[in-house]
Amino acid sequence: MMESFPPGTFIGEMQAPFKWILIHAARFQGIIRVNASDGEGYVMVRKGEPMGCMFRRKDDLLKGKEAYSHITSYPVVNLSILRYSGEEMESAARLAQSEGAEYQMAGSSPISSPLAEHAQAQGELKKERFNGQAGATAVKAGTAKIPPRKPRDGSPQVVEEKAVVLPSGLDTESLAHLLLGRMLRLPGVQAVSIFGRGSSVLSIGDVELDSLVVLAEDMLEAAKEISSVMRTGPFVHLTLQIPAGKVIIAPYFNEYLCILTGPEVNLGQIRKILKDIPSASDAGGM
Amino acid sequence: MSTDRGAPERTPKVDLKRIFSLDGVRMSLVIDPEGEVKEEMGAENIDGDQLAAVVSFVMAESRAMATRLGDDQISMVFVEFRDIALLSLPLEEGYFLLLLTDPSANVGQISYELKKSQESAGALQ
């Protein structure tokens, strides 16, 4: 179904109501692959609005509004998010149109909108675009029809990433911009995970962090106990340094970040990004 | 200001006075594998015993993480709060050195000085 679509830049996987992700994708343009119990499909999204949609349900191929209604009828679906550049978006829009998958919401721009709009979107995103090599993780099993993502250069192996639940209140657009766009581009950063209550909300990078977050949470809880014996102020971060690298744990909105790095990482750069997170959130998020 | 809690034969040799003199260091403690303070210097308003007990848990959890990552050795654990930072370094035989510093302290410089101290004393891992 999506073999001919541009691969885009992989952002992450999650389980969420589809409409919820749209609410939090006001600056996003790309394609969201959908995997549900009765089939799979995609929704092309520009600035928080669906532009094209297709869903294969057993032998039925749903297109446009029909496909979108079907996808949004699920309380929760598995989503895989790919960001597109302006050029990729153009190409995908033409494909969706040729397949009859065009979907237009009332008052929104059609797929065949002027190039100028794409150029504007491209311009807005230029500063925020991710490095094409960043954040490569495996495509989930069972999505063989989905175009493969390019692995990060020099990555030892591509690992399988488990779909995760994204709680409400987590700003995925900011997450993508702040973590993928900045942290994963730093030399030595291997993986970043957002976690809470002992489970990973989202993991991105070359190393699977899901199994580490329980230990990360134990470290975090132990560190927070320090505040019970002396005046410390709020927790800022914890860094475990071992010969092979570093594990950094820091607050991220209502959750925590776990960052795994090699030994060569510049801790100052990471701390700078961590300090920017609250202000980035205040600036509008998604 | 410096308190020696005994068991000198087994306690790793650490020049607490020199470490305490480093910029930004408010308190320095040597903690044994049982989480008890063997030697301390500075910050008399902080209960070293309670702090040692709590930080021992942090070190234990950190060791678990290090082991999970395939490394039995911890180089350093650094915990930063808004008002204070804690730097913990393993010594010989399960002992560790804990430093309380200003959050603005130059941790890199302190680590460097500790390594120098380690080389000269041969006490730190």
Image (cartoon, coloured by chain):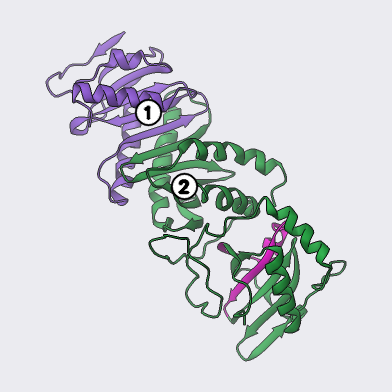
Q: Position of residue B68 (x, y in %)?
A: 31, 51
| Residue identifier under label 1 | B87
Residue type marked 1:
Leu
Residue A23: within the magenta?
A: yes
> Which shade is chain B?
purple
Q: Which residues are magenta?
A: A11-37
Please indicate, yes or no, whether residue A205 appears anywhere in the rendered image.
yes
Q: Crowdedness of circle 1 by 10 Å Cα count: few (<14), some, many (20+)?
A: many
Which part of the image, by quadrant, shows the N terminus of chain B? top left
Residue pushed farthest top? B1
Residue A102 falls in which quadrant of the image?
bottom right
Q: Position of residue A68 (x, y in %)?
A: 72, 75
Q: In this picture, is A31 found above or below A217? A: below
| Residue identifier under label 2 | A187
Q: In this picture, is B64 found above or below A8? A: above
User: Is the residue at mark 1 from the same chain as the one at mark 2?
Assistant: no
Q: Which chain is rendered green in the image?
A: A
Looking at the rendered structure, the secondary structure element under dot 1 is: strand
Residue at 71% in and 42% down: A283
Residue B71: within the magenta?
A: no
Looking at the rendered structure, the secondary structure element under dot 2 is: loop
In-front residue for pair A172/A38: A172
Residue pushed farthest bottom? A59
